[in-house]
Amino acid sequence: MISVIVFFVLGGLLGLILGYASKLFKVESNPLVDQVEALMPGGQCGQCGEPGCRQAAEAMVRGELAPTSCPPGGAALSAAVAEMLGVSVELSDDEKVWIARIDERRCSGCTRCYKACPFDAIVGANRQIHTVIKDVCTGCKLCSQVCPQDCLTVEPTVPDMSAWFWPKPAVINKAG
């Protein structure tokens, strides 16, 4: 019984010391970096050239990385980050949304694509057929690089009822 009380008191004291140390040694960060990082997909895929989304957000705030450098984020992320940073970016109107697709007839269930996906968009088990959750897939193309059977491709989505948007209206100049 004494050992339980000793461990309880020791745990409480260590908890208080760690709590005080975390407040004493807290490192303040740039709130703009925190806001940009909150917009990022958070997959740490590294396609922007940085090791993670936090480092990419820091580089964007410093001006070393363009807001358009995050492929999984797409045009919506680029526009939001550019507006937040007060910079202008050139976005193409016909930017395609990419989605991974698995040819289940050729899939052997090796789980390499499953392990490579930073967004958990691929489901399946070892030696079972895998499939892609289209709503979660960002089209980062990391899974297609590791597939040994070449049964995984990343293709642009075909507009359907769930992924179709009205095109922007054409500007008519009546100054003539």
Image: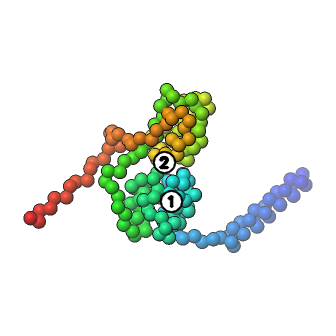
Q: Locate residue 9, reporting x and y percent.
A: 83, 60
Residue visible at 47% across and 69% down in the picture: 63
Residue 30's place in the image compared with 2, above or below, is below
Residue 114 visible somewhere in the drawing = no
Residue type at the position of mark 1: Ala
SS class, disc 1: helix
Q: Locate residue 14, reporting x and y percent.
A: 78, 63
In the shown orientation, is residue 125 left or right of residue 102?
right
Residue visible at 46% across and 51% down in the picture: 72
Residue 21's place in the image compared with 140, above or below, is below
Q: Locate residue 38, reporting x and y percent.
A: 50, 59
Residue 51's place in the image compared with 145, above or below, is below
Q: Which of the labelled discs sits on residue 38, or is there none?
A: 1
Residue type at the position of mark 2: Cys
In the shown orientation, is residue 172 left or right of residue 71?
left
The outermost residue toward the right is 2
Disc 2 target residue:
140
Residue visible at 55% across and 59% down in the picture: 50
In the shown orientation, is residue 121 left or right of residue 20?
left
